[in-house]
Image (cartoon, helix red, strand yellow):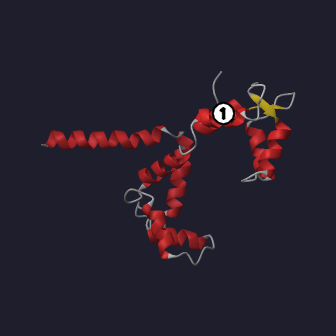
């Protein structure tokens, strides 16, 4: 019977280690710091009271119990650090598949060059739907600078959106 328990524990450990492999060590450290800030009573679990306290510290004083419960219910159980990290991993993996995003960009690229003009993309992103701010545009161009002709490689953007890092060429 003991070997079965050990085996089950090892299998559970593998599942939790997968979430850690989704992130760089520096990202895990940042999430750990955020978790520690949210875990106001330092018991290793984020509770409704922890959320209420951290929201109050940010000026959100009249948060309804139902809202807090909804936040807590997003997790499958008590929110320890591994669950917290898993929740972030799931949110980050929530982007559309790469081919879907590339197809959306291809509509803007009738010649099929794999790139679009910076000015055109900037106009779309700052005037349509969830409009980008000037700061967001600055960050976009810092991460994905256009080439000397002013073209932006949208396939690289799509790759980073879905994989979280630039392709190595």
Task: Spot the residue most to the bottom.
Answer: 62
Percent coordinates x, y for residue 37 in the rendering: 53, 62
Q: Quadrant of the C terminus?
A: top right
Q: Nearer the viewer, residue 153 or 22?
A: 153
Residue in the picture at 49% in, 47% down: 90
Whether residue 95 can be seen here? yes
What residue would you read off at disc 1?
A: 102
Q: In which quarter of the image is the N terminus?
A: top left
Whether residue 164 can be seen here? no
- Secondary structure found at label 1: helix
Residue in the picture at 64% in, 37% down: 101
Percent coordinates x, y for residue 149 in the rendering: 87, 28
Rendered position, 105 above or below 53? above
Q: In this view, does 72 lie to the left or right of 30?
A: left
Percent coordinates x, y for residue 2 in the rendering: 15, 43
Rendered position, 75 above or below 28? below
Q: In this view, does 145 lie to the left or right of 8?
A: right
Q: Which of 168 and 93 is in front in this view?
A: 93
Percent coordinates x, y for residue 107 in the rendering: 73, 35
Q: Total number of numbered labels?
A: 1
Q: In this view, does 66 lie to the left or right of 115?
A: left
How crowded pointer 1 is (Cα within 10 Å; few <14, some 14-19, many 20+) is rated as some
Q: Nearer the viewer, residue 43 or 105?
A: 105
């Amino acid at each position: 019977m003991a070997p079965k328990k050990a085996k089950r524990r090892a299998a559970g450990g593998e599942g939790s280690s997968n979430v850690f492999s989704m992130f760089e060590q520096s990202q895990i450290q940042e999430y750990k710091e955020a978790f520690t800030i949210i875990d106001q009573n330092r018991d290793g679990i984020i509770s409704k009271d922890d959320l209420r306290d951290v929201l109050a510290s940010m000026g959100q004083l009249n948060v309804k119990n139902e809202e807090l419960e909804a936040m807590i219910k997003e997790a499958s159980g008590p929110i320890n650090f591994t669950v917290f990290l898993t929740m972030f991993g799931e949110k980050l993996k929530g982007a559309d598949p790469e081919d879907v995003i590339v197809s959306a960009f291809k509509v803007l690229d009738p010649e099929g060059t794999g790139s679009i003009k910076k000015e055109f993309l900037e106009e779309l992103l700052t005037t349509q739907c969830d409009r980008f701010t000037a700061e967001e545009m600055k960050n976009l161009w810092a991460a994905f600078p256009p080439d000397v002709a002013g073209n932006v490689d949208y396939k690289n953007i799509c790759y980073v959106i879905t994989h979280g890092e630039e392709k190595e060429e």
